[in-house]
Amino acid sequence: MKLEAIRIRVRTWLVVVSLIITSATLPSIAAEQIYPANPQADGSTAVARARVAADVLMSSYDPNKAWFPSSWWNSAVALQTIGDYMQRTGDRRYLGQLDNTFEKDKGVFPAGVLSGDPLLGNFTSRAIDDSEWWGLAWVQAYDLTRNPKYLDMAVTIANYVDGYWDTSTCGGGVWWNAERTYKNAVTNGLWIRLTAELHNRIPGDHVWLTRSRTAWAWFQGSGMINANGLVNDGLTDSCTNNGQTVWTYNQGMAIGAGLELWRATRDPQILASVRRLADAAIAPNALVTDGILTESCDAADQTCDDNGKQFKGIFMRYWTDLVDTTRDRQYAAFLDAQAEGIWNNDRDAAGRLGTRWSGATSDDHPNVFDWRTQASALSALVGDVPALTPLASLAATMSPAQPVVMPSASGATAIAIDLRASATGFFPLQALASIDPPAGWNISPRASLIRLQPHGNAAPASDTLSLKVTVPSSATDGHHLITANLAAIGLHFTTQADVLIAHKIDFDTGTVNETPWLFDPDGSQSNGVQNRFADGTAHFTYRFPFPADTTSAQVILTIDNEFMVQVSTDNVHWTTVLQEMQPITDGSNKAARGIDLTPYLGVATDGAKPIYLKVSDAFPNDGWGGRVYHVTANIVE
């Protein structure tokens, strides 16, 4: 018998034995826990979708600072979401990043390095809720690895937080900050969940369970849960419900707190309270609009801040726990509806997921896409993965997913696109890739077999098919989709590239119109429309593929603060063309500045003369780097 045949036969027996063992050790699993309630998305597809979204999120992880740029508590939640993804799917590729963060960021840091507050060491600060988020993240890391250092860190954090439990004001509760100015829902929901998680992982514990029980009883009687069963933000100075916004993460955190404490106690009254919180969340006039979870700042005339962008994901993390715990079909159907809505309505060709899960947008308040919104929506996609991970999955992406073509007046333009397929499973896989270009475009190859050899779920196997796309000079301005369909036995996946045909450059930063031109965002940030900035060592780079017959070009940047602008024809060798020589941090030098790019127009390659434009920080030590609002260009052909 050939060696490969023996290997396949051994893998088959291993899978069978694994299934037998699993069925023996999990005696009571309902169908809705194993398979998604929505028949339109099978389990294998749910795994593939989550993998694509998780990879997009981790592309924003900064390995040097070991976080996601410029947001401390959000980074904790994003890393915990990646932990959820790994735990749910079996993919273990990002364990190194979790440990990198643990080892690099556990020390003491002054204000402004990783957080606006000084970090006191062991992931603690004056922001008590921030400390708790990190505690939960390290419990998740412990669950994944069983390395006791993570659980020890969670205990250290919890001991720190316990110092802010105070019965002298409002009869109990953890203070929100070290100044002891506010008692609120999120800090105390986190406290209940963290203490219950510690109890459920420390053999023989009584201390953490007692603290969790006490905190739950206090929270239930605090008045923060209003008459409709919704959780307002916190308490007034006179210890009454302050009537502030019902944020989704407060509701979700209360649900999650109760679920973990129920696992510790099996008290039916706790589970009944959790169900009331859940039913209130999806009741009419609560947190759902047209079946989709909606934050108050998702309104068409508002924009969520960097905190609000992640609230819904926290809700979905604990809603997934609710589905797994209760196996309630109504709760499962709601979870599936969120995942389907996000994938179908709130996703661009690059796999980025936005803040409004309905996909709604407007010129003044556009749907925002960044790593925070990615982490939030990923939680819903992770929840849609069956609790028993499917044995195989197939996913695909295209790169670049949003290329720009500026056709010349005559002749076609060729661009290269890579189709990357990935798979998990235990058997060799042959996927047929068929590619459909827009009418009148040529693509080669139109169809091809991609062979993948996965070895389980821990490290998905991948391969890349290179495509040559020929765009006719007659292509009209606008977005044109190239669709790739991959199919294997029992598996299928569809991905797209969104090609922008443009004869001019004119866009506001911080909008979807900027995205196709943004070649490398690096560690830059955008806080809304007409706003992209790069502080410290961060930068952002635009790529302008000027037509092959371009004879002169000028780009105009509306820019301010401490900018440095560089130009390159190859994204390697750079020439500084614009620089602020004074330390200006108030935007007082804001102006539209023209840059003549004509000297940098090289020889056309594949029908284009590409120019790379990089914006960075001229004074990297003070954190007020170049900020761009609007970009236009004048081109002569």
Image (cartoon, rainbow, N blue to C red):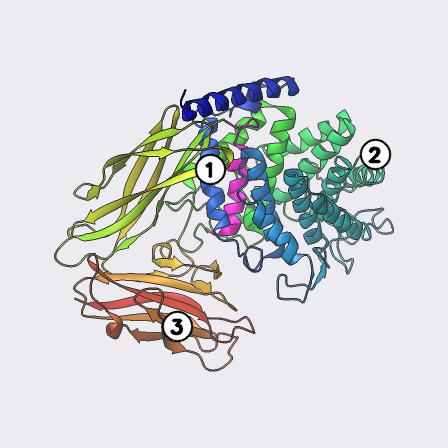
Q: Which residue is mark 1?
A: 460
* Element type at mark 1: strand
Crowd band around label 2 with a 10 angstrom C-alpha radius: few (<14), some (14–19), many (20+): few
Label 2 to label 3: alpha-carbon separation: 61 Å
- Find the magenta span and give its range: 370-390
Q: Which residue is mark 3?
A: 565
Most extreme residue toward the front, as rendered? 1
Relative horizontal placement of residue 489, taking residue 522 as reference (left or right):
left
Give coordinates of residue 531: x percent, y percent.
Answer: 45, 63
Q: Is residue 299 visible?
A: no
Q: Amino acid at mark 2?
A: Gly
Label 1 to label 3: alpha-carbon separation: 39 Å
Relative horizontal placement of residue 369, taking residue 174 as reference (left or right):
left
Relative horizontal placement of residue 319, taking residue 174 as reference (left or right):
left
Give the position of the N terminus as an image quadrant.
Answer: top left
Give the position of the C terminus as an image quadrant.
Answer: bottom left
Q: Say which label, 2 or 1, has the lower sequence index.
A: 2
Q: Which residue is mark 2?
A: 204
Q: Amino acid at mark 3?
A: Val
Which residue is rendered at x = 54% and y = 32% of the image? 335
Q: Is residue 449 visible?
A: yes
Labelled pair 2, 3 in contact (Cβ < 8 Å): no
Vertical comparison of 442 with 410: above or below: above
Q: Amino acid at mark 1?
A: Pro
* Element type at mark 2: loop
Asked if the stretch drawn in magenta spans residue 475, the answer is no
